[in-house]
Amino acid sequence: MSDSSEKLPISDYYKVIDYVTIFKSAKWWEAIVVYESSGRRSIGFYLWEKRNDTWKRKNKFSVRNLDEWNKLKNAVDQFTPKLSSK
């Protein structure tokens, strides 16, 4: 599912299993990454900013297990109706 010929700007400490780019421009890159660290897999929500022609991580949020994901998903599902303007 990897969708870019450009190498994902993630630390070599992590083994990238797969990723999908959500948004990419000349200055910003958002991606969701399945990565492995110390034998455990997580899903990371990444945001990088390009500075001096180099991608620098601006933000990272990780989901470590299915229980955590279900709590996050339920919370987001409760708020999605509020995205619509009335």
Image (tube, grey):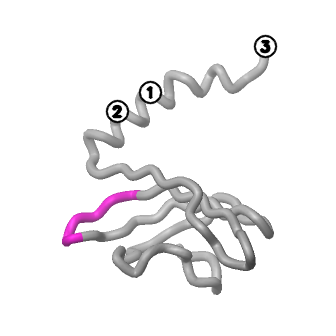
Q: What is the number of the mark on residue 75?
A: 1
Tell me which label, 1 or 3, sits earlier in the chain.
Answer: 1
Label 1 environment density (alpha carbons within 10 Å; few <14, some 14–19, many ≥20): few
Task: Identify the residue shown where x is 60% and y is 68%.
Answer: 56
Task: Identify the residue shown where x is 39% and y is 58%.
Answer: 43
> Which is nearer the eye, 11 or 83?
11
Q: Is residue 40 magenta?
A: yes
Placement of 82 over or under 34, stated as above or below = above
> Which is nearer the eye, 37 or 76?
37
Identified by mark 3, the residue type is: Lys
Quadrant of the frame with the C terminus: top right
Residue stretch rendered in magenta on the structure:
38-43
Tell me the SS state at disc 2.
helix
Task: Identify the residue shown where x is 64% and y is 72%.
Answer: 55
Tell me whether the residue at label 2 lies in contact with that at label 1, contact meaning CB atoms closer than 8 angstroms.
yes
Residues under labels 1 and 3: Cα distance? 21 Å
| Mark 1 vs mark 3: in front | 1
Residue denoted by label 3? 86
Q: Position of residue 67 (x, y in %)?
A: 26, 40
Residue denoted by label 2? 71
Which of the 4 image quarters holds residue 80?
A: top right
Identified by mark 1, the residue type is: Ala
Q: Would residue 74 appear left or right of 57 to someone viewing this image?
A: left
Q: Position of residue 39 (x, y in %)?
A: 19, 71
